[in-house]
């Protein structure tokens, strides 16, 4: 397993655009934004779950819109690549349930969890260790789990649905999400 991890770093390190530094830079920027908006705090996540705080959905819509456009054009220019995974309905349902349970217990998601760990939240560290062990078990027994995930429904994406107009479709999708993030009224639980 250690060889596999080292191989991942070697592969990324040999990319022509210096991706390890790019990844570190993006990680630092992402961490700064999470800290600045305070979305890693339990109150923000709980406020979002109770629909009393809109900071989290505003940030999510904005981030997904911006990165959709950015990633698509980075791929087009050869600075990045992505691999679309097949749609496995059973896996999506089971994964969504596990994700929801974990988020309800810890009040964190995989993006905000490491920020909380860096802030000293040991309860989230336990959840992160459990997530890594769960991922390891899933990887080792993937062939057995494949049976309950269902058959593949394909690898559809906006680029395959709007063939011939991919750039426009991604741009409209991204701008649409950014506009939604701006339109969502700003409400913060702390103000009540």
Image: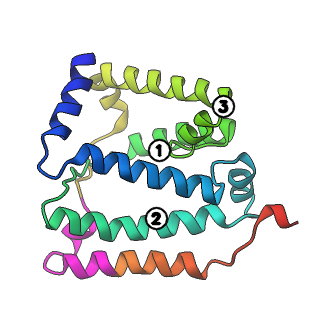
Which residue is denoted by mark 3 in the rendering?
120
Quarter of the image where one finds residue 105: top right
Q: CA distance from mark 3 to mark 1?
A: 32 Å
Q: Is residue 165 above or below residue 17?
A: below
Can see residue 38? Answer: yes
Which residue is denoted by mark 1 in the rendering?
93
The residue at the far right in this view is 192
* Foreground label between 2 and 3: 3
**Which range of residues does the magenta coloring cover?**
156-171
Q: CA distance from mark 2 to mark 3?
A: 26 Å
Which residue is denoted by mark 2 in the rendering?
63
Q: CA distance from mark 2 to mark 1?
A: 24 Å
Who's the residue at 24% across and 60% down the image?
156
Quarter of the image where one finds residue 29: bottom left
Q: Which of the two labelled residues, at mark 2 and mark 1, occupies the earlier sequence position?
A: 2
* Foreground label between 3 and 1: 3
Q: In the picture, which quadrant includes the N terminus?
A: top left
Give the prevailing secondary structure in the magenta stretch: helix
Q: Nearer the viewer, residue 138 or 167?
A: 167
């Amino acid at each position: 397993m250690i060889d596999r991890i080292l191989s991942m770093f070697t592969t990324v390190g040999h990319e022509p655009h210096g991706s390890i530094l790019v990844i570190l830079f993006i990680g630092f920027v992402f961490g700064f934004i999470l800290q600045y908006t305070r979305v890693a705090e339990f109150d923000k996540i709980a406020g979002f779950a109770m629909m009393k705080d809109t900071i989290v959905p505003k940030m999510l819509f904005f981030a997904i819109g911006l990165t959709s456009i950015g990633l698509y054009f980075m791929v087009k220019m050869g600075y990045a690549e992505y691999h679309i995974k097949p749609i496995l309905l059973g896996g999506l349902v089971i994964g969504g349930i596990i994700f929801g349970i974990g988020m309800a217990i810890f009040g964190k998601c995989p993006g905000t969890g490491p920020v909380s760990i860096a802030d000293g939240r040991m309860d989230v560290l336990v959840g992160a260790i459990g997530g890594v062990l769960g991922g390891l078990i899933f990887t080792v027994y993937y062939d057995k789990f494949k049976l309950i995930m269902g058959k593949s429904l394909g690898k559809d994406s906006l680029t395959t649905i709007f063939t011939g107009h991919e750039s426009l479709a991604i741009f409209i999708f991204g701008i649409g999400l950014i506009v939604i993030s701006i339109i969502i009224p700003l409400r913060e639980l702390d103000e009540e």
